[in-house]
Amino acid sequence: MRILLSSLVLVASFTLFACEGRPPEVVAVPVAAVGDPYGDSDCNLQTKLVEGIPGSPGHLVASTRNPNGDSELALLMRRFVDDLRTVRPLLEAGQPVDKLWPIHHRMRCAWPTRPEERTEQYDLRAQGYLLAVRAFDEAPGRDTYNGIIAGCIACHSVSCGGPIEFIGSMKWE
Ligand code: HEC
């Protein structure tokens, strides 16, 4: 019963705090740049976004949970949430974890719901966040995990404040 209740609360908090709609589902991820594992030539502020792909304006990805559809960036954010939920118990159990940067760095070239929000300021905040992701990948653990959460919150306190409380609840105390 308690488990049921807490998952209900979780679902409710998503509903309340999401910016637009919901669910993660599948995010297409091109193979990361070869050479420098943290190279950003394949995805940066100058990268031209491809019109008409799933999650682009006019082509939001509809689901039963969000019939209005989600943008590519919203789906990627849901993937971030899933990734954090996956790595923490693994680390607590002393298990290895996959690197997050190869997928998370796609946030610099993913369609937001409102394309005009992909600004230089957004990109700088994304780069700051990705430094935290890189630190995590190089030394996965509680401190670097919490560094990622701080990066989520730092950006969300500027844009899309909705999920902040929910993100804060993912801190590894
Ligand atoms: C550089 C800025 C930035 C960072 C860093 C960032 N976000 Fe977001 N987030 C956004 C923006 C902008 C949106 C709105 C996306 C859209 O509507 O297309 C968003 C949307 C969301 C949503 C709502 C998704 C939905 O279903 O609509 C959640 C949940 C979320 N972010 C969680 C996170 C988490 C967890 C992290 C860290 C792991 C994180 N964000 C890091 C900018 C950021």
Image (cartoon, rainbow, N blue to C red):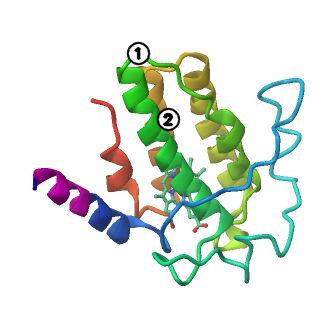
Q: Which residue is mark 2?
A: 148
Quarter of the image that includes the C terminus: top left
Which mark is on residue 94? Answer: 1
Look at label 1 and name its amino acid. Gly
- Going 68% across and 45% down the picture, which residue do you hit? 124
Residue 142 is covered by the magenta coloring: no
Magenta portion: prevailing SS class: helix
Q: Position of residue 119 (x, y in %)?
A: 72, 60
Q: Position of residue 44 (x, y in %)?
A: 81, 47
Q: Mark 1–mark 2 contact, CB under 8 Å?
A: no
Q: Secondary structure at mark 2?
A: helix
Look at label 2 and name its amino acid. Ile
* Residue 128 picture quarter: top right
Q: Nearer the viewer, residue 32 or 154?
A: 32
Q: Which residues are magenta?
A: 2-9
Residue 8 is covered by the magenta coloring: yes
* Vertical relation: 169 (above or below) 120: above
Q: Mark 2: few, some, or many residues within 10 Å (few <14, many ≥20)?
A: many
Ligand 1 within 8 Å, label 1 CB: no
Residues under labels 1 and 2: Cα distance?
A: 19 Å
